[in-house]
Amino acid sequence: MTQAELIAALPAGRLPPDLTAPGPAELLALFGAGLMVAALVALLIAPFLARRPSRRARIRATRALAPQERLLAIARILGHLPKALRPAAYGGQAPPSSEVIERIALRSTRVFSRRDAGRK
């Protein structure tokens, strides 16, 4: 027995035939509701899809900081402080020029210790 036969077998007054098939108004309302749900989902996931600035751009954004603050900011960006910048960061010598700091930071690669090597 198909759905149409089942509905036809119902006694009169039980279910109007207009409710069995959606009309243009109902289809349009469903389409509009779907668009609103899609817009809400897009707004919720937009922060996760935003592109992060590159490491180079984040390092260049520190140019306006004082040398000691800039070294700290670069250490936060890189996750470590390059060995060439450590004496300047800890007050052992005067901080290098802004261009030198940037060059050292951009060339820096993460150096893993033996403890870190075991985590791979």
Image (spheres, grey):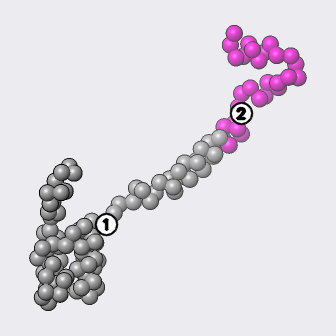
Q: Which residue is mark 1?
A: 53
* Residue 27 location, quadrant: top right
In this view, the residue in front, 81 or 98, is: 81
- Whether the residues at callouts 2 and 1 have beta carbons within 8 Å, the answer is no
* Residue 52, percent from left and from top: 33, 63
Horizontal and vertical percent for residue 118? 18, 51
Name the residue rendered at 74%, 26% in the picture: 20
Looking at the image, which residue is at 17% across and 87% down? 91
Q: Residue at x 19, y 56 (%)?
A: 116
**Front residue (pair 22, 114):** 114
According to the picture, the residue beneath numbered tag 2 turns out to be: 23
Secondary structure under the numbered disc 1 in the rendered image: loop
> Is 69 a magenta residue?
no
The residue range painted magenta reads 1-29
Q: Give the amino acid at mark 1.
A: Pro
Q: Residue at x 21, y 69 (%)?
A: 80
| Type of the residue with mark 2 | Gly
